Every structure is written in C-alpha cells, then in structure tokens.
Amino acid sequence: MTDINKEHNHSEKDKEKAHNKRVKEEKSFTIVAVILYSVFLMILVVASYVGVRIFIKNSKAKQEAAALAAAEQAKEDQVIEEEQIEEPVEEVEPETEAGEWKDVVFSRLENPKDPKNALINTYNFTRMVSENDSGHAMDYAVYSDDSGLVEKITTTENCGDLFEIIDYYFDNGNINYIAQYSEAVDIPIDVSTAAVESRYYFANDKLVRYIYCEEGKAYEYSIEDIKDYSDGTVDQYYYMEEMMLEKAKATWDTAKDVNSTVTVEGYVLDEYNQALKENKVTLIDADGNVSYETKTDGDGKYSIEVKADDSKEYTLRAERNTLIDVNVYGIKAKNGDKKISVPTIYMAYSDVEMPYNYQLFIKDADDANIAITDADIKFRNGLNAREGDVFLSGNLGEFGYISPQLRSGSYTAEVIKDGYETLYINFVVKPDHIGTVAYAVKDVAEDEFKAVINWEANPLDIDIRCFSSSAANILRSNADSVGSTTAEVIDIKDAGSDAYYFYVSDFTNTAIDNYMAYGLTDCNAQLALYDKDGLVYTYPVPAAHAGVVWKPLEIRNGKVYVVNDYYTSIGTDSIFKKK
C-alpha cells in the first residue's frame, strides 16, 4: 500500500512539472504571435493610406466635373413642388434609342391646311369587314398609292353605343403615327384638332410621344421626360406603347393584303307583304351565268357575300313557282363598297291578273311646286331597268301626271325631259301601293354631284346632310321638306378630289329621342345620285332596320362607294338633333 502511494505521489510531481513547462512554452509562443500580428497590421494600414491618397488624387478631377454637370442640369430641369411628389421617382432609361419622330406620312396625306385637296382623297381605296375576338364588327378601310404601298389603315369597331375609330399611318410598313377617337355616329372630323382624343408618335417601333385630349385640354407625355414621371405613369406609358404597337402590327397583317368582299342583301315578300321562305335568289353575270345562289330565311331575308370586282355587274333574280320572277338590274360590288342594299322584292302571283290604276306624279326636285310636264315616259319590267323591252309608253300631261293600268309587280319608269337628267323611277304595284311621287333634277354640270332623297310615308320630316373631308363643310338641302313635300336635294358644285359623306336622318323621331324607331326604314326612302353622265344609281334605305340615321354612301375623288350603315345611338349633342 505504501509503495503504491509513493509511486502515485511521484507520478503527480512529474505531471505538475510537465504542465508548468507547457504553460511557459505557450506564453512564449503567444507573445511572439502578438508581436508578428501587430507588425502586419501596421504595414497594412500604411499601404491602405497610400492607396487611398493615390485614388483620391486621380479621381478628384472627375468628381468636380460631375458635380458641375449636375449643377448645370439642375438649372435646366423643371422644379417639382414637394406637395406634388407622391413617391420617390426612379430614373428609367428606354430599352433602346427611340430617335426623333418625323412627320413623314400624316401631313403629306391629310394636308391639314387644305383638306379639300388632301392627297389621301386620291389614293386607291378598299374595305374589308370582319369580326374581332370580342365579337364586335370591324371595318378596315385601306388606302394605298398607285404602286400599291399601303400608307393608311382606318379601323372602325362597333362597340354598341360608340364606334372606336383608329387611324394608322405607316412609313414603308412601319408605324409612324396613330390617331384614336370615339363617335356615336361615324362622321368626319378634323383630324388636326382636339377632336382626336389620343395621338401616338412612333420612331423605330418606340413610342416617343403621347398626347391625350379631354374637355379641350391636352396632356402630353414623352420619352424625354419619362424620368420625371411616377412609377405608375411610367408603367402606363410603356403599356400603351406595347398595346398600340401590337394593334398596329395586327392591323397591318390583317388589312395589307385585303381580299375584299361586299355583302348583297335584301328581302323577298309576296304582293300581300308575306315573307317568302326558302325563296331562290341568284346573281347572274353579264354572260347569263349564275355566279352566286342562295335562299331566303324565315323572314324572307337573303345575304350574299360577293367578291369585290370593279369590272363586274350582276342581275339579281328572285324565282319561285306560281310567282312572277323579279329582276333587279345593275348590281355592282366594287372595291371599297361595304354593303349593297337591294330594294325589297314583292313577287306577284302569276294567276292574279287584276290591274290597278297606278298614280305617278313627277315634280321638280328643287321646287316641288313645279310639275314636270310634256315629258316622254317609258315602262319596263324589273327594277333599275334602264335598257330592254318597253311594254308601255306615253306622255306626261300638263299636271305632270300619268295613270297607267298595271298588275302587281316591280317596274322601272324612264322619264325624258329637256333640261333635266333622265329620270329612272323604281316602283312596286301591289294592293296597298298604287301611287307614288318622283322628283327630277335639272341637268348636272361637269364636276358636280346632286343627291335627291325622297320618301313616301311617315316620318313627316327627313333631313339629308353631306360632310366634306375633315368636316370642313356640312351641306344641307335648301328646302326643309315637311308634310306633302317629300324630297330634299344636296348639290355639290366643284367637287374636285374632296371626299363627301352622306347621311339621312329621321328628324321626327330623333326630336323625341325615339332612336329605335322603324320610321326611316319603313317609309321607302331612296337616294338617287347624279353626276354629269346622269343617274349614277338609286340607293334604297335598308329594310327592317331600327334607327334614326342612315349613311348610304360616300364619294372619294369622284368615285362612289356604297356604305349602308345604320345608327341607333347618336350622342347627346348630335348634329342630327338640330336643323
């Protein structure tokens, strides 16, 4: 036991000596390490100080120049008051250089200083109608020069109570300028005024300027000042850029290779005004070949999509067993036409031969108190029949009146009188229609157009207006026909290359805000247009349409284009509510 304790005590002393030795060695190492580290830190501090001094010396000139430039810029920038700043504005640079907008298309085409002689009026014009993704009717009007280069496309979207109209101007296929506005009735506006609600200026596919007009005030935003706008305004700016650029490209792709078709439509009824369902309707070309064929629906309506072709003319024929065929001559579907409204066809039963004493009165269109007397008159079967067999002829008496005996059917009367353009009267004889009044116009001069609107029944007051391009002039009839006088005349002298847009309105129902009235379509209104060569054509009001404004046609550089738009909303301060 004692030996064990001795050995144990000896071991403890050895351990203590070893421990003391290690402690002394660790202290020595720590002191050396601290000395070395201190020396390193001193070297690092000296080196950093020298480097910073060199950097400051080299950068001083640049910092002073930058400070001077910033001070100079501050003098030029507009001061924004603190209360106007809603949030910090982060400077935003455009993704690519937009460049400067150049007016290379708009002023050259529209000639704002002299719109009557605008180059756009002389351009080739065609039209396409389709439906967009929202189910709205879209009208594309395409303007191109003689080489076929498209420089302007106007889209008109029917949004219900309003028409959204956008004019796109292209520079060799690249969008250069866009004008956007809304109208209750699509009437011409001065495209250089605040009537255009939004204007977009593009360069290198970048929106460089945007102007918005509201209540006579203009608000302008530009890429140059975008650094001064709030984040929300910047986001909206780039959103409009992307949206309008996409619209322009889609419009270009849709319309640049337009394959235009024209709708030819109308109704077929029997002589007792009953709709003829499944009635055969054909379009026959000049060689007697059937080019298009369809049948009427349950309301007696037919509709044919005809490929636009300026060189072709058709005869529309309605056929049915036990009824007498009816021909409507001179049907054309030209490039730029939109919809051809055919007079309502009333088919007479072949086994009913009872004649009627039809009353036909002819008056002067400019003065309804003047009867057309001592004039030759010829009768042909069918509507718009200017040529072909004459089955009856006669002479107007001293009261400008004739009463031939005619069975139910569709006829054309030709009236020839010195000093007047040859008058062609489309009329229908049936049990409830045995008389009409027609109006002749005096000879039309070179570079002149005359438009005569006449009607038979209520409404008592119909007005005709003609807008020239950019609404520079609004032409009205010299006489406001009310009551027994049922005709008004628009006379365009020195027409030139200007564009003219015709509108016929039902003032009787417009005055009482009855915009869904059928009076205009039920009164058998028809517009006869004359030029130096005589009657261009007689355009009937579309049948079975509610509405108070009808746009039958437009003239561009002396060429006539059929439109046949109908409007049931005219806006709160419409010109059609005024005399």
Image (spheres, grey):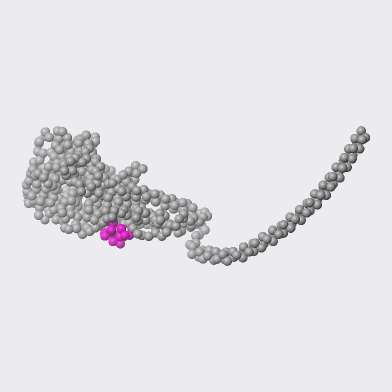
Residue 568 x %, y %: 29, 45
Which residue is painted at 20% across and 54% down in the image?
490
How many numbered tags mark residues here? 0
Q: Nearer the viewer, residue 422 or 131?
A: 131
Q: Is residue 171 visible?
A: yes
**In the figure, 527 relative to 497: above or below?**
above
Residue 33 x %, y %: 76, 53
Q: Nearer the viewer, residue 408 or 538?
A: 538
Q: Is residue 111 magenta?
A: yes
Which residue is painted at 85% across and 42% down in the image?
15
Can you tell which quarter of the image residue 62 is in? bottom right
Q: Is residue 81 left or right of residue 427?
A: right
**In the figure, 107 relative to 322: above or below?**
below
Which residue is painted at 7% across and 51% down in the image?
374
Which residue is painted at 28% across and 61% down in the image?
114
Q: Nearer the viewer, residue 399 or 265?
A: 265
Residue stretch in magenta: 106-121
Residue 72 x %, y %: 51, 66
Q: Is residue 292 left or right of residue 83?
A: left
Q: Is residue 339 visible?
A: no
**In the figure, 277 relative to 118: above or below?**
above
Can you tell which quarter of the image residue 404 is in? top left
State which quarter of the image contains the N terminus: top right
Q: Is residue 67 magenta?
A: no
Q: What is the chief secondary structure element of the magenta stretch?
A: helix
Residue 400 x %, y %: 9, 49
